Amino acid sequence: MKLPAPLIEGRLIRRYKRFLADVLLQDGNEVVAHCPNTGSMLGCQPPDARVWLSTSDNPRRKLKYTWELVETSPDEMACINTSRPNNQAREAIEQGTVPELSGYGVCKAEVRYGAEKSRIDLHLSGHKDLADAWVEVKNVTLCDDGLGYFPDAVTTRGQKHLRELMAQARAGERAVLFFVVNHTGITSVRPADHIDRAYGELLREAHAAGVELLAYRAALTGLEGPDGDISLVKPVPVILKG
């Protein structure tokens, strides 16, 4: 998946009010960028970190810059823009990168479903042999010594999504939790029991009920030129045991 080009490099001064970040650009100008991430961004906002911003010339926008990427540690990058993972997952599925979800003729986004009135990120239909697949996408950026964790904050919304997926699995449909790993240092994904124990327990219950767990890692390439790319390229294991 291509990133908006060109990306502008800077240094993070601070993130505040959830949706704002002050960034010092390489030319010495300080700008306010939109932070498209409602989560805690634990581990993804170290002071003075190298960051990359996209730009927009839309006159209706209040802020010209959008925070896209951060260098969390030397040689490790993360995509913090949570509007990207759904498109990353969809592109990977449609291009055949995810063999577990191949063979479906139709992919729709934001389809209403479930007793709790949710919207599924991706609904796959039209497979000649398999039931429809209901795919919930989650962005993983919390990394600790190569281990990826989800969630990075307590999430009642995430628990609701797991309940909805369990209901689909029990009804005979395919229910899939798809972790988009947007951190280059992550080699496996596991529930963040130390942050949200209830989510971890429900995730294990969902898997036992038939919810499929997939995780694919992005390769963040070409950031210095016009060809920045965050395509999903590699599966990584999901480990449920503590």
Image: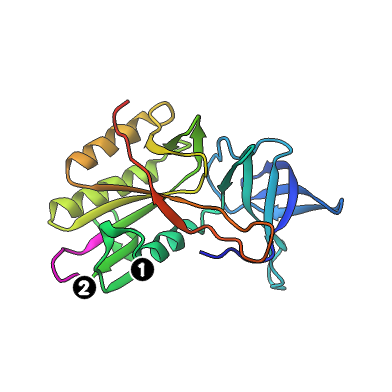
Residue in view at x 72 percent, y 63 percent: 64
Secondary structure beneath label 1:
helix
Q: Which residue is mark 2?
A: 126
Tell which tag, 1 or 2, sits nearer the viewer.
Answer: 1
Residues under labels 1 and 2: Cα distance? 13 Å
Q: Is residue 9 above or below residue 242?
A: below
Horizontal and vertical percent position of residue 52: 68, 53
Q: Which stretch did the figure color magenta?
A: 126-133
Horizontal and vertical percent position of residue 27: 86, 54
Q: Which residue is mark 1?
A: 94
Q: Is residue 50 left or right of residue 140?
A: right
Q: Is residue 241 above or below residue 210?
A: above
Q: Is residue 109 visible?
A: no
Horizontal and vertical percent position of residue 169: 17, 52
Residue in view at x 62 percent, y 58 percent: 222
Q: Residue furthest right?
A: 28
Which amino acid, mark 1? Glu
Q: Are marks 1 and 2 in contact (CB under 8 Å)?
A: no
Q: Is residue 175 visible?
A: yes
Horizontal and vertical percent position of residue 179: 38, 48
